[in-house]
Image (cartoon, rainbow, N blue to C red):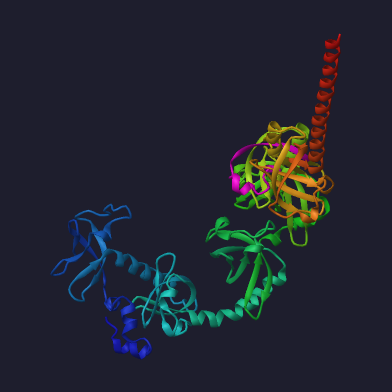
Amino acid sequence: MKISPEKIDEMYPNEGEDFVSMLGHSEQLEDNVLKEGNIVKIDNANVMIDIKEKKEGRMSVDEIKDSHGKLLFKEGDCILVYVSRRNGLKVSYKKAQKYKKIIDEINSLGDNYKDKVVEGVIKESNKGGYVVESSSGIEYFMPRHLSAFSKDRDNSKLYGKSIKACIVEIRHHTNSIIISRKRYLDTNVAIQKENAKKLVESGLAYEGVIKSITKFGLFVEIGAVEGLVHFTEISYKGPVNPAKAYKVGEKIQVKPIEYNEEKNRLSLSIRALFEDPWKEIKDEIKVGYVIRVVVSNLESYGAFVDLGNDVEGFLHISEMSWDKNIKQPSDCLKVGDEINVEVIEVDVDNRKLRVSLKKLQDKPFDKFVKAHKVGDILKGNVATITNFGAFVNLGNVDGLLHNEDAFWDKSKKCSDEFKVGDIIEVKIEKIDATNEKISLNRRYLIESPSEKFAKKYNIDDEISGKVIDIKDFGIFIKVDNEDIDALIKNEDLGNLSRENIKIGDAIKGALAHIDKKTNRVRLSIRRLQKKKERQELNEYNSDEKITLGDAISDAFKSSLNKQ
């Protein structure tokens, strides 16, 4: 028996031939479409089936293979096939299985099928409507005007969407089941509201089934009512990834906590089934307490630790160790580790608990101070370079080497001379225990320009140079042929008038002082003048002695001659 397209138009004027084709390309309108046939031949591509008609039907060999590509039947076996007579005789084993499921479902429903709720996934669509397939493989047809979807909605975005609908018609002559999502929404919204309110008002816990999982929570069905367990309502530990902790179809205990009538939304909770552990935390855990925890999760920025009562604390990577070489939490911890930590923050209102591991370890600075003192000479690695100097790693602590303490030449900077990783020798100049800072010096470990200068010159040596700067307290000259400057104080200018001195003037002075520690050299014109005066006096005195001696000698000789 066939149902004509005209009849379909009369029954569903909005669907037309699209509805007919959606029911199986009109093949479901044929009587006796399921037949048993014998497998006559199997080759690499096709299977020939004898269905006791004038010619044999043919189908692809893939229809009788399992998921591993193994044949399910052999030549001579009798199998159930779906027969199509449009455009020649065709048979299908897979269609027969689907079609048989629909027939079995129709038989099981009987006459009491009206408004029975079914659930399935939208599999395909066209202008006529949608094919909805249940989890057991039964296909239903939902005409577009019964779908409650907007006309301009993109059908492709509906594929895979899970829906609920009511059975509104069974057509025995076509073995098809017609469903309506619109009917389900119309009849169930009022019931859903009433039942949802009752669930919340009861204050009880219920067993539900997880129907779907999203990134923001679990959709759980309690009887005919569906509610959402937001991911923040899963555990007191904090937000939980629903997909990692649960699976669709799983039965769980939930407690209805709120119903939003305007949005028709039922909120459920898993954590509400238990006492709030943060009430216990408030009274029993204080900042400074040492507690035993288990590492429950590692992230790039730190670790979450389980206190054992559905409360998690957070251990930031900066609180794991004094060792600055730790780049990620897995360098020192792994999930499942039991560790002692110190509580450094308890915020019950915002449900935050921060802990520290390194506070239970000896500070590297304290270890360093016990082992070293000011004046010690050490080797270290350049860890960081800044505009003002460099930080040198001395093990588990860093010391600061300022530019002026690194070189005798004030124009040089650490950024010009060093690179990260260089090994240099330094001297501990200062240890600031209060602020945990270490000051370093390098220039005292290398020969200063003044030390080199002292090897060539002695005090009172005559030194020449040119004026390079004039200050209120004196003048600076650049010593000729030497890489050093010298100061002549105002009181050491001698008879040289300060007002007559200008930059570039050539000046001579006597070496008055060398300070090797500060790399300073002082000259004195006054001292040089006195030195020259002494020299002249000595020479003069020397000339007088020679003249007197000669006179005495001559007189003595004359006396002898007279005798």
Based on the picture, tell me whether residue 419 belongs to the magenta stretch: yes
Residue lying at 62% horizontally and 58% vertically, measured from the top left: 240
**Position in image of residue 454 (x %, y %):** 71, 33
Q: Where does the C terminus fall, quadrant-wise?
A: top right
Q: Nearer the viewer, residue 152 or 288?
A: 288
Q: Tell me where residue 384 appears, x and y as whole percent.
A: 63, 47
In magenta, the rendered stretch is 405-430
Taking 93 as reference, is 307 above or below it?
Answer: above
> Where in the figure is residue 450, as x and y percent of width and height?
71, 37
Dividing the picture into quadrants, the one containing residue 331 is top right
Would residue 363 be seen by someone viewing this image from the given angle? no
Residue sitting nearer the eye, 103 or 519: 519
Q: Residue furthest top?
A: 563
Report the residue that reaches farthest toward the front. Answer: 562
For the N terminus, the quadrant is bottom left
Q: Is residue 180 left or right of residue 553?
A: left
Q: Is residue 551 above or below residue 299?
A: above
264 and 355: which is toward the camera: 355
Which residue ends up furthest to the left in the rendered image?
54
Does residue 105 appear anywhere in the picture? Answer: yes
Residue 273 lies, in percent from the top left, at 70, 60
Question: Measured along the vertical axis of the image, is residue 551 above or below residue 394?
Answer: above
Magenta-drawn stretch contains 364: no
* Number of numbered discs: 0
Left or right: 14 as drawn, with respect to 448: left
- Viewer-nearest residue: 281 or 209: 281
